[in-house]
Image (cartoon, helix red, strand yellow):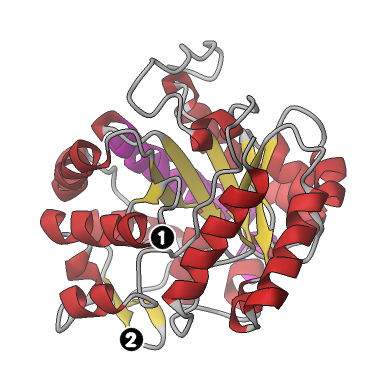
Amino acid sequence: MSANHSPAGPQPTATYESAFLKACRREPVPHTPVWFMRQAGRSLPEYLKVREGIPMLESCMRPELVAEITLQPVRRHHVDAAIYFSDIVVPLKAIGVDLDIKPGVGPVVQNPVRSRADLAQLRDLTPEDVWYVTEAIGLLTAELGETPLIGFAGAPFTLASYLVEGGPSKNHEHTKALMYSDPQLWADLLDRLAEITSDFLKVQIEAGASAVQLFDSWVGALAPADYRRSVMPASSKVFDAVASYGVPRIHFGVGTGELLGLMGEAGADVVGVDWRVPLDEAARRVGPGKALQGNLDPAVLFASTEAVEAKTREVLDAAAGLEGHVFNLGHGVMPSMDPDALSRLVEYVHTQTAR
């Protein structure tokens, strides 16, 4: 469906009345729902055990392993939503881009995109390319029951930055140089990535994901004017492409305090907020009609239980007047975090917000 069609609206499912989906829809909730970015992963000993000796990208392509890893934090922490275990570069790998995830470094692209000829690497993504995603989500929804599954993808800007830089970057110099020097090539690159990302999210929703999150991890590197001109059209294209499914669409980036209003304007139903902006101020920047997600500083989890509870209380107080609030960290779970601290945090939020 095109963006001109009105959304068909979500169909009642086992997860429809969950606290997480109610919060995303800005409806009254029995308690503030909680989930954590990177909740499935290196902080859990059971994750390290099942991943032992298996490279990251390969682990994303084994349906039974993906299902097990995705379920681990739901079992352990009693979070209100699962997030599909994958990596933002999986769709790029699936269409044949020569890349690998190097331990301690991150995604590394063999042939960076620097010219128009390099766009040839980016063919259309088909459901057959990511058959393992469909299979894993089938396994997951059968196990999760009333607990929603969040699908996700990397946003066009962040994927473009990996492709243009050839890997992670602090300053995004090649990315910005291309964006400023050849705006047409840049627009064409982001448009291609928007198509691939849209198709990847559609696969996840059609397989049974109850919500989707678009991660724009690096977009905080941009000024608002550059975001509006050079990034927002592609992000909006992704949100429009999945609008007709009626599932909540979450948008998150790091260091995006100055971009929060624009990120909501791009088409998200829920705007993720990192820890740098209090939620009440974030609500002013985003404006009405959107739920917010966030935003405890992940580093707080290394403090005493009393300190964690005090800082969590600050987040909950700042969120008190919001139309909808999903509690999360302001970024992902760190590998060295104590899993028990996360479990205690979930219980604390549930207890403090029970209605």
Res 103 label: 2
Left or right of residue 319, residue 354 in this image: left
Mark 2: secondary structure: loop
Quadrant including the N terminus = top left
Ranked by sequence position, the earlier of labels 2 and 1 is: 1
Instruction: Quarter of the image for the C terminus: give it.
Output: top right
Membership of 192 in magenta stretch: yes
Q: Nearer the viewer, residue 125 or 286?
A: 286
Relative height, residue 23 to residue 232 (above, below): above
Q: Is residue 206 magenta?
A: no
- The answer to whether residue 341 shows anywhere in this view is yes
Q: Residue at x 64, y 53 (%)?
A: 183
Q: Is residue 329 above or below residue 14?
A: below
Looking at numbered disc 2 in the image, what kind of residue is underneath it? Pro
Residue 96 shows in this picture: no
> Residue drawn at (60%, 31%), measured in percent from left and top?
29
Span colored in magenta: 177-205
